[in-house]
């Protein structure tokens, strides 16, 4: 990557022109390096939402919203989905390279070894209401891991990363499955060394002593692919939260918990839940796809079509193409008719031909299909975001580790544009 090979010129009122370094990244993207701007000029930049601000230099993920490209460590998302499982992709993101056969086995063995929850942690679940939102429990349980594994406070990423990180990747699925069992008032099912990562999760969720449960291979495939699709997505809201908390030198568990809280919002990880709720509302009210589109175009109506458009992608979300194919495969497996899928496909066809959606670059995103798949697998709607969190966890961890090695290394501290009063004097309480 070329740094400071060329310069931009900034002209400010009553100041000499300033030469500002330009960074050219590995994909040819240009960035204006303003890290010394305030020191040299007294000015800051104003960028609500940070849509034009690069907060770090990262080698983990590449997103090109104009061309619909998503790559992890240089590998195209389609290539990874077709040839890898989630454990391999987690290894890729965290350690930087895809594992060979021996590394893959060692990593899987370590995941199994770290999959059990401490007995005292299991009792935490019983203190939560049965109807507590799963994301509140997941975030709380994740940060609680630092109380049970305090060695994380002094972690040396080079020496302890396998154990500390793998512990979190493994236990997060156990925590999620236990939360599902708790909501249903059922006993917990422990993980088994005989099962793969995704097989274990499904078994811990749905195994029952009163009927025979068989793990569906298609559901295992679907879960692997969905987790891969969600594994990282550059500097989104939750990843930025993780890196910001990491910059204070908070431990891994605290930083990840912050990411989970950020993911919880319906504008981020809660979008797939919002899609299902929208489709259910439309189905219950017998709205057609055209009715939904018309409501979205009506400026006097607050209704929004969920699952369309993306903050970064200005063309089709590359994950959505994969999720759509997988969605039809999973929902068509048993031949049962799903009216929500029919409505979703009809809505896609109508919306993508409508000039209102075309002009605004509103195409189906990955969330438009993932909720339908999770629903078919038996995962309740209020747990869709926790499924997103399991998938995104390796990406969060990779960014936490990358920040720990960042040579810049300063705590994140954005500036602001102040809009309050200039100076006020305090009056005595009787004069106010």
Image (cartoon, rainbow, N blue to C red):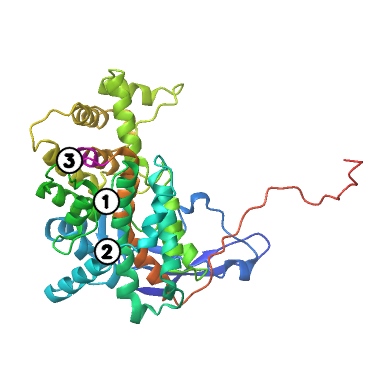
Measured along the vertical axis of the image, is residue 7 above or below residue 77? below
Residue that label 1 marks = 67
The numbered mark at residue 327 is 3
In the rendered image, which quarter is residue 131 located in? top left
Asked whether residue 147 is in view, the answer is yes
Residue 272 is situated, as x and y percent measured from the top left of the image, at 32, 40
Q: Residue at x 21, y 46 (%)?
A: 206
Mark 1–mark 2 distance (CA, rounded to whole Å): 39 Å
State the SS at label 2. loop
User: Where does the magenta region start and end?
Assistant: 373-379
Camera-side mark, 1 or 2:
2
Residue that label 2 marks = 115
Asked whether residue 236 is in view, the answer is no
Badge 1 crowding class, 10 Å Cα cut-off, few under 14, some 14 to 19, many 20 or more, is few
In the rendered image, which quarter is residue 185 located in? top left
Residue 355 is situated, as x and y percent measured from the top left of the image, at 30, 29
Please name the predominant secondary structure of the magenta segment in the image.
Answer: helix
């Amino acid at each position: 990557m070329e740094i400071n090979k060329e310069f931009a010129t900034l002209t400010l009122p009553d100041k000499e022109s300033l030469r500002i370094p330009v960074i050219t990244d590995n994909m040819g993207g240009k960035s204006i390096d303003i890290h010394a701007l305030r020191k040299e000029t007294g000015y800051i930049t104003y960028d609500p939402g940070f849509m034009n601000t690069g907060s770090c230099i990262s080698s983990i993920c590449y997103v090109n919203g104009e061309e619909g490209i998503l790559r992890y460590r240089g590998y195209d998302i389609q290539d990874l989905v077709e040839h890898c499982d989630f454990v391999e992709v987690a290894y890729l993101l965290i350690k930087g390279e895809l594992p060979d056969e021996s590394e893959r086995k060692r990593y899987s063995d370590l995941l199994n070894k770290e999959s059990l929850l401490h007995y005292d942690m299991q009792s935490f679940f019983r203190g939560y209401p049965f109807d507590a939102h799963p994301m509140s429990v997941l975030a709380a349980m994740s940060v609680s891991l630092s109380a049970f594994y305090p060695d994380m406070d002094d972690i040396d990423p080079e020496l302890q990363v396998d154990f500390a990180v793998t512990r979190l990747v493994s236990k997060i699925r156990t925590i999620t499955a236990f939360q599902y069992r708790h909501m249903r008032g059922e006993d917990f099912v422990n993980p088994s060394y005989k099962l793969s990562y995704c097989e274990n999760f499904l078994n811990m969720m749905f195994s029952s002593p009163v009927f025979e449960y068989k793990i569906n291979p298609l559901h295992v495939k679907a879960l692997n692919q969905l987790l891969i699709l969600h594994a990282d997505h550059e500097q989104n809201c939750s990843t930025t939260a993780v890196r910001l908390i990491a910059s204070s030198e908070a431990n891994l568990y605290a930083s990840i918990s912050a990411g989970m809280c950020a993911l919880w919002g319906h504008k981020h990880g809660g979008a797939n839940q919002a899609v299902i709720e929208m489709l259910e509302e439309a189905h219950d009210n017998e709205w057609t796809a055209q009715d939904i589109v018309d409501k979205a175009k009506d400026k006097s109506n607050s209704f929004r079509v969920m699952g369309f458009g993306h903050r970064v992608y200005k063309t089709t979300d590359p994950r959505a193409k994969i999720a759509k194919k997988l969605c039809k495969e999973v929902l068509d497996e048993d031949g049962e008719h799903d009216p929500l899928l029919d409505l979703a496909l009809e809505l896609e066809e109508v919306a993508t031909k409508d000039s209102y959606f075309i002009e605004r670059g509103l195409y189906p995103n990955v969330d438009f299909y993932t909720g339908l798949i999770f629903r078919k697998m038996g995962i309740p709607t209020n747990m869709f975001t926790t499924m997103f969190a399991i998938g995104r966890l390796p990406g969060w961890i990779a960014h936490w580790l990358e920040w720990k090695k960042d040579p810049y290394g300063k705590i994140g501290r954005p500036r602001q544009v102040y809009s309050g009063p200039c100076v006020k004097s305090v009056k005595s309480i009787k004069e106010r």
